[in-house]
Amino acid sequence: MQFTCEMFHPNIYPDGRVCISILHAPGDDPMGYESSAERWSPVQSVEKVLLSVISMLAEPNEESGANVDAAKMWREDRNQFYAIADKLVCKSLNIPV
C-alpha cells in the first residue's frame, strides 16, 4: 500500500509506502519483532487492513519508524509534527496555507 500524496508520518516511508505489520510478507519476522499472526495472510480482509491503516495514522508505532525524522519529531515535538502534517494536508487538498 502506498500513499500518492506527500505524507509525514513515522510509519510511512518518504516515498509513501506504508510500514504496517498486516501488510508485511507472511511468515516469521527475521527481526523477531512481529508474530506471524500479525503479518499478511490470505484470510485478512480489506476491512481489517483499512482499519489497521486508520489506526496507524491515528496512533503511530514509534518503535517501527519508516520515516526516522517524523518518528523523532512525533516523540520530541508533537506540535511541530502536527504543524507539518497540517501543512501537507492543505497542500494535498490545494488549500492555501
Image (cartoon, rainbow, N blue to C red):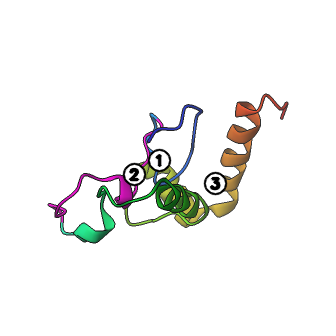
Rendered location of residue 87, percent (x, y): 73, 40
Residue type at the position of mark 2: Cys
Residue 17 magenta: yes
Of tags 1 and 3, which is closer to the observer? 1
The residue labelled by disc 2 is 19
Circle 1 packing at 10 Å, graded few (<14), some (14-19), many (20+), is: many
Residue type at the position of mark 1: Ile
Location of the N terminus (image quadrant): top left
The residue labelled by disc 1 is 12
Q: Quadrant of residue 35?
A: bottom left
Residue type at the position of mark 3: Phe
Per the rendering, the mark at residue 81 is 3
Residue 6 appears left or right of 22: right
Residue depicted at x 45% and y 65%: 62
Of all residues shown, which one is farthest toward the right?
Answer: 96
Residue 29 magenta: yes
